[in-house]
Image (cartoon, rainbow, N blue to C red):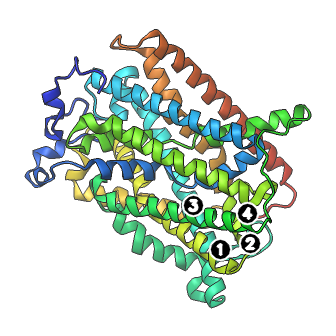
Amino acid sequence: MTIGDITPKKERKSRRSKHVVDEKAPLLPKRQDEDAGYDEFNGASYTGAVFNLSTTIVGAGIMALPATMKVLGLILGIAMIIFMAFLTNASIEFLLRFSRAGKTTSYGGLMADAFGKYGRIFLQICVLVNNIGVLIVYMIIIGDVLSGTSSSGVHHAGVLEGWFGEHWWNGRTLVLIVTTLGIFSPLACFKRIDSLSFTSAFSVALAVVFLVITVGIAIVKLISGTIMMPRLLPDVTDLTSFLKLFTVVPVLVTAYICHYNVHSIDNELEDSTQIRPVVRTALALCSTVYIMTSFFGFLLFGDATLDDVLANFDTDLGIPYSSLLNDAVRVSYAAHLMLVFPIVFYPLRLNMDGLLFPSARPLALSNTRFAFITTGLITVIFLGANFIPSIWDAFQFTGATAAVCLGFIFPAAITLRDRHFIATKKDKTLAVFMIVLAVFSNLVAIYSDAYALFKKNSGAGPRA
């Protein structure tokens, strides 16, 4: 850690030395140490922490990155991915440094330390909006991939429909019920985030499977001479094309959002001095996956790259076994999202508990409260994915706004507030830059989403 002068090293080595400073913090610290049953847990491993943080980062956003290359070109696009990784590392460093100074063990506790009770509540609301929106979108995508969709007016067959034909048992609602009860619910019942380290590792592996297939197809088509040289720089010919460059900013700004899980992962590490290497390793791993996915996805599809590159794998790829490879990509991606679900759900549940029961004992010690909140949230997410036609459009606005608040605006505001007088001039300059970038990306996202909604206003119908 960067502020060993504030907390002695011997006190930072063991997770058991971390005592609760703010009992009302949403990402709950480890008062479960008071419970003898939890003393059997000796702390999370470095590898498990890396996989959990990486899974938090690599969600559905990876599929939008190749389209950013179409707008920015390969050179500028890859440079922006690397730049955002460094900026994310800096924002997480702000959180960790000020948490040590204020002796807080949660993001909510840190916001309360800097801005009082209302700062903590605002943080909790943002986590709820962001994570519920993300999980609903994940469930919608899983339903689309497995059971198909007609939301655009044209029916796209799902994987199960393509394999077995259209039957009652592979309909969208039943598939999502089985997925919710058989996968989401069991994984959501773990009380420690480290318990998800193996599923997180498998989730990252599935993202790599998608990457390997994409690379393989691109190489085959490159050898056969059916791929043209991709554009290296943006194509700017007029003011409209120049303004279009900024439409990818929200995608890049939100690509590494994982801040709401950093404290939970840090709290469970046996040696908390490892949290900075964990963050850097996870960011390096995700940056590598992002860069290769963006490069080979754009190389493969060129200017035909769609906003969601997964949709490009719904057509003939022009190589042998095209249909089999398409299905492998779609199934591996759907399975990846299923395993990301509990990692994003974990902080959602903690923040909901902190918002509803701010003075109660830790959630892990109350089975009734744990079951009540878990069941309620999963039900809301399931209903949102199935029965609310405009949920996707709604969260295009609120999700992007909440995400940049969590990732950049809040860490920067904490730094500028500087209650413990540890921020340098460089820190404050960087904090101002983060806020300007975040506000700008929000304005662009809201404008582009509003423009797209008005544009399709005439023909769009409710979800199928």
Identified by mark 4, the residue type is Leu
Callout 2–callout 1 Cβ contact below 8 Å: yes
| Left or right: where 425 falls relative to 19 | right
Mark 4 residue crowding within 10 angstroms, few (<14) / some (14–19) / many (20+): some
Residue highlighted by disc 3: 211
- Closer to the eye: label 1 or 3: 3
Callout 1–callout 3 Cβ contact below 8 Å: no
Residue highlighted by disc 4: 222
Depth check: give the residue in front, 112 or 287: 287
Q: CA distance from mark 1 to mark 3?
A: 13 Å
- Secondary structure type for disc 4: helix
Depth check: give the residue in front, 70 or 405: 70
- Looking at this view, name the residue that lies furthest to the left: 36
| Left or right: where 137 falls relative to 448 | left
**Could you tell me residue 223's position as x and y percent?**
72, 66
Q: Give the mark nearer the N terminus: 3 vs 2.
A: 3
Q: CA distance from mark 2 to mark 4?
A: 13 Å
Quadrant location, the N terminus = top left
- Secondary structure type for disc 1: helix
| Rendered view: 375 above or below 464 | above
**Could you tell me residue 38's position as x and y percent?**
14, 52
Identified by mark 2, the residue type is Leu
Residue highlighted by disc 2: 317
